[in-house]
Amino acid sequence: MTRGVMRYIRLYGSFLRFSFSKAMEFRLDFYFRVVMDMVFYAVHLLFFTIIYDHTSMLGGWTLDQIYVFVCGAMLVDALHMTIFANNLWWLPIYINRGDLDYYLVRPVSSLFFLSVREFAANSFLNLIAASALVVWALGRHGGLDPVGILVYLLFLVAGTFIHYLVRITFIIPVFWLHSNRGLDEMAWTLHRLSERPHQIYPGPLRWILLSVLPLAFTVSYPAHVLFGGLTWQAVAHLLTVVAGLFLFVVWFWNLALKAYSSASS
Amino acid sequence: MRAGLFTRVVSLEARKQMSYRVDFWINAVMGFVAELTIAYFLWAAIFQARGADRIGGFTFEGMALYYVAAILLAKLVRGQSKDLTIARDIYEGSLTRYLIYPCSYVLFKYAEHLGSLVPALLQTLVFGVMALFWMQIPGDVQIDSLSVAMALTLVVVANMLAFLLRFPIQGVAFWADNVWSLNVMLRLATELLGGLLLPLSLFPPAAQAFLAWLPFPYFFYVPVQTLFGRVSVGEWLAALGVMSVWCVVIGAIGAMVWRRGHRVYTGVGI
């Protein structure tokens, strides 16, 4: 078991080394990406700043609380862009071209290999910027318990994993649809539901976002736990959602592989 | 470029865009419903928290209608704004084949751009008619034949502006390997400063006055306000004037980037 885990960690280390050397080959793209993410952060912060010019509360949160929420969203986005986004971009292309053979014959999980193979070193700088923004927002809010902040950060990491699991669920249908991007565009559109506090949605929609399509867990629920206090029910809820969704994705991936037909061998 | 060839390219592109019909309609319906749901409940929460009848000159019903119109008109203005075919032509070297075609590259791409608008037009019609049946039109929104004609004229010019913007942005591919990030930056800036994320009347007055000189408000906010009958003929003419100037400026920048880019372009192995 331990040897198996160590093997995956060593493999990931090789992915990291390769990705950093590759990023340095495309320097202009590297700088463009940095500026793009800065624009992304500015747009989100400005959006809520303008809204709070016209109200003092949104979903029960003040401006300081919403800044913590927004900066949390940026951190999740930066983690996703750095670890998963490039890989998920290439996945439908490999499937449609019949190029999966190379990955299916490797002696490691094909889902793991295809999900994390390419580490976006050019987004790594933005991960630092997003982390700095989270520190700024938490400092601006003040009066938060350090343990609560640690739990919040752990919840955000789990939220990043949920974001990846939801997105790959919408990409996997490309095995049957054979379209350019599967239902990825829909996944991105639905992801926008998570960019607002989940308390603003009515009961049934909020229930969906906390269960079958658990987008509220990516950013909003962690902030909700930070401001409302950690309970065992919240931890159990999160663990159930992560485990349930992960098992579903593994099952769905294996089912989809049966529909795959190679074009290159 | 002959008119026959132009219409043929438009038709081919339209069919290409509609080739994956299941995907197309699922993405279109879900996209529209999700965007509207987010805006609707966001503003429901704000109006409830504020306890006001109007915010930024909009009632709650007016605000919901604003988002319906903005989302639908944005489809017509932007077309396939995520499309990076020009940059791809340059980077992959397939621009070479266009250079020896007996027609203008710009016109060829414009025909493709218009063809890609056909699905957007279909979506706008279907969702627009459904929204008109389901939604209440508040008293301060006056949609009539004149306001529709004025708004559509602005949409046509805004669409041209969006097309012209592709050349200076994607032309950077002559020097850079990947311009996807530049396109995303433009989208993000346009959505906020153009009034797709928020009506610009919510911005501070100084910001509104400054933005009026930039091309962004004319992509979404001004066409929607025109459709709602809130823009006088004089203001509409002024908007057309500003948009025309920006078309010329952006067209000139695009032409300059294109000319300089051609000097460094190499289509190896094509």
Image (spheres, coloured by chain):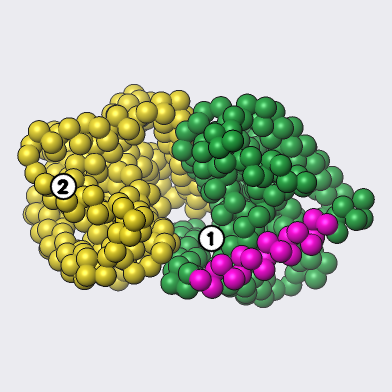
Q: Can you identify the residue that label 2 sits on? A: B101
Relative to B15, does residue A218 appear above or below in the rendering? Answer: below
Q: Residue at x 62, y 54 (%)?
A: A84
Asked whether residue B11 is in view, the answer is yes
Q: CA distance from mark 1 to mark 2?
A: 60 Å
Query: Mark 1 is on which residue type?
Result: Ser
As for residue A9 lying within the magenta part, the answer is yes
- In this rendered view, identify the residue nearer to me: B76 or A93: A93
The answer to the question of whether label 1 and label 2 lie on touching residues, with beta carbons closer than 8 A, is no
- Residue pictured at 62% horizontal, 57% vertical: A118
Horizontal and vertical percent position of residue A5: 85, 55
Placement of B129 over or under B266, stated as above or below: above
Residue B167 percent coordinates (x, y) = 25, 59
> For the residues carrying marks 1 and 2, which lies nearer the camera in this image?
2
Q: Position of residue A6 (x, y in %)?
A: 85, 59
In what element is the residue under mark 2?
loop
Q: Nearer the viewer, residue A30 or A213?
A: A30
> Judging from the image, what is the letter of the chain drawn in green?
A
Q: Which residue is mark 1?
A: A56
Name which residue lies at 34% across and 34% down. B17
**Which label sits on residue B42?**
none
Q: Amino acid at mark 2?
A: Tyr
Q: Which residues are magenta?
A: A7-25
Visual hue assigned to chain B: yellow
Place residue B234 in its image quadrant.
Answer: bottom left
Secondary element at tag 1: loop
- Residue appearing at x 30%, y 47% in the figure: B78
Relative to A30, does residue B38 appear above or below in the rendering?
A: above
Image check: A89 left or right of B130?
Answer: right
A247 vs B139, left or right, is right
